[in-house]
Amino acid sequence: DTGVSQDPRHKITKRGQNVTFRCDPISEHNRLYWYRQTLGQGPEFLTYFQNEAQLEKSRLLSDRFSAERPKGSFSTLEIQRTEQGDSAMYLCASSQTGTSGTWEQFFGPGTRLTVL
Amino acid sequence: AQKITQTQPGMFVQEKEAVTLDCTYDTSDPSYGLFWYKQPSSGEMIFLIYQGSYDQQNATEGRYSLNFQKARKSANLVISASQLGDSAMYFCAMRLGSTLGRLYFGRGTQLTVWP
């Protein structure tokens, strides 16, 4: 039973470049979440999907950010025209919804983005 | 607006002792869930324990227990018999029952266990 995986684990880019991150959730999980975490802070919600539908987007998700989950399995998060303020850890999580249970979110190892 | 407050930036405890990490929350939603996650230096968030707003009893998972005081809107994590491996960042988080979606996180408490 594999957990949530994210690729790449680290990304260094120059300001103005585009970057794309991938997240593979736990296989039977229908929900997938993206969070951003800066140093000394808790994770901040960005967006989440149920299957392929994007159900909620945070106001933090500016027009430069876009996320997709085309077939309801893996998801990509793209940041266009990166800025130094985008430097953070990007965390992906997945959960399984149902009629009972805690529906806890399982997190991946994160992608650390550094914008120079 | 939903909010989680963790007032202890850092806590220190001696090995084998118990420690309580504080968490208060604020929401007008009558249905919600409270979570605690552990984040070691490696960065991965590890789920520890969950308490639902309608649960009558405090949640327990091994050495972890959640001291849920609904009237005070507090959900403190108690770790018994601390181990060196418990040294990590601990986050309290809340999920609203009306959406069952995003988690709202606090700023975390850095726990250091010393021998």
Image: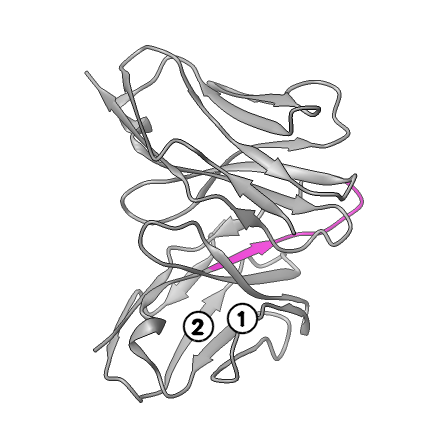
Q: Secondary structure beneath disc 2?
A: strand
Q: Main secondary structure of the magenta part?
A: loop
Q: Is residue B110 above or below residue A77?
A: above
Are both tags, 2 and 1, on one chain?
yes
The x, y position of residue A77, in whole percent, is: 47, 75
The x, y position of residue B23, in whole percent, is: 52, 31
Q: Residues within 10 Å of mark 1 (few under 14, many from 20)?
A: many
Residue drawn at x 54%, y 70% is A74
The residue carrying mark 2 is A22
Disc 2 marks a residue whose amino acid type is Arg
The residue carrying mark 1 is A74
Disc 1 marks a residue whose amino acid type is Phe
Q: Which residues are magenta?
A: A92-101
Would you say residue A111 sits in the magenta stretch?
Answer: no
Label 2 to label 1: alpha-carbon separation: 7 Å
Q: Is residue A78 left or right of residue A28?
A: left
The x, y position of residue B32, in whole percent, is: 71, 40
Q: Is residue B56 above or below residue A113?
A: above
Q: Is residue A70 above or below residue B79?
A: below
Check contact, mark 2 vs mark 1: CB within 8 A. Answer: yes
Q: Is residue B104 above or below residue B67?
A: below
